[in-house]
Image: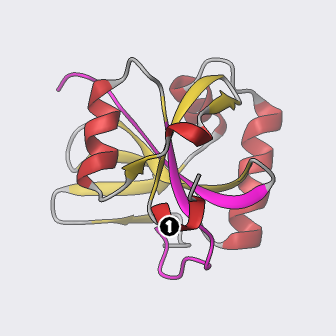
Amino acid sequence: MSSARAGTDRLRLRRLVHTDACAHNPSDGVALHRRRDRRRAQHGYGYWVVGRHGRARQPGFRGIEPMGLHGEPVLNLFHRFAPSPGAAHVPDLPLIARVRPANRASQRVAERAGLSRAPHLDTEGYDGFDWIYVARPEHWAA
């Protein structure tokens, strides 16, 4: 999915532009958008705007992005969708999801995606405290 647009019969995906980045997280700015753009160019994957065909409103964002967790490189599985109406090749990095403790919907998504809660990895994230869910719990044995 390295092209500017992709999708399914029901949904369309497109690369973020600066105004999208600011909409999904108001603290994001031009520098963060440029960093994400460089990462996409370097790795071939990143965040996408998720939309419905034939509708102007964008319900959310989804994607993966490399980051560090306790000194180890990982891929963060990110999604943020409005409460109302990857890549073809993923490197061999541990897959995690950072979830806010109060965000039950994101916790359920992580669990349904097969990720397991790893409380010993919880940490202060880029923009708040994160609960960590992991795809391979054996990799992160406490």
Q: Position of residue 41 (x, y in %)?
A: 73, 68
Visual colour scheme:
secondary structure
Question: Relative to 72, is 112 on the left or the right?
Answer: left
Q: Nearer the viewer, residue 52 or 60?
A: 60
Question: Relative to 25, is 33 on the left or the right?
Answer: right
Q: Is any part of residue 136 visible from this angle? A: yes
Question: Relative to 80, is 108 on the left or the right?
Answer: left
Q: Nearer the viewer, residue 56 or 49?
A: 49
Q: Position of residue 123 (x, y in %)?
A: 66, 31
Name of the residue lying farthest toward the front: 142
Asked if residue 70 is among those painted magenta in the image, a careful observer would answer: no
Q: Nearer the viewer, residue 67 or 8?
A: 67
Residue named by callout 1 = 138
Residue 25, image quadrant: top right
* Picture residue at 17% right of the left edge, 26% below the top: 85
* Picture residue at 67% right of the left edge, 23% below the top: 127
Above or below residue 100? Residue 102 is above
Give the number of callouts.
1
* Picture residue at 56% right of the left edge, 73% below the top: 2
* Picture residue at 29% right of the left edge, 56% below the top: 113
Above or below residue 122? Residue 140 is below
Q: Position of residue 28 (x, y in %)?
A: 69, 26
Residue 139, image quadrant: bottom right
The range drawn in magenta is: 72-98
Mark 1: few, some, or many residues within 10 Å (few <14, many ≥20)? few
Above or below residue 45? Residue 34 is above
Q: Is any part of residue 58 visible from this angle? A: no
Instruction: Give the amino acid at mark 1.
Output: Glu
Q: Position of residue 50 (x, y in %)?
A: 36, 47
Task: Find numbered disc 1 in the image and state the secondary structure of the residue it sits on.
Answer: helix
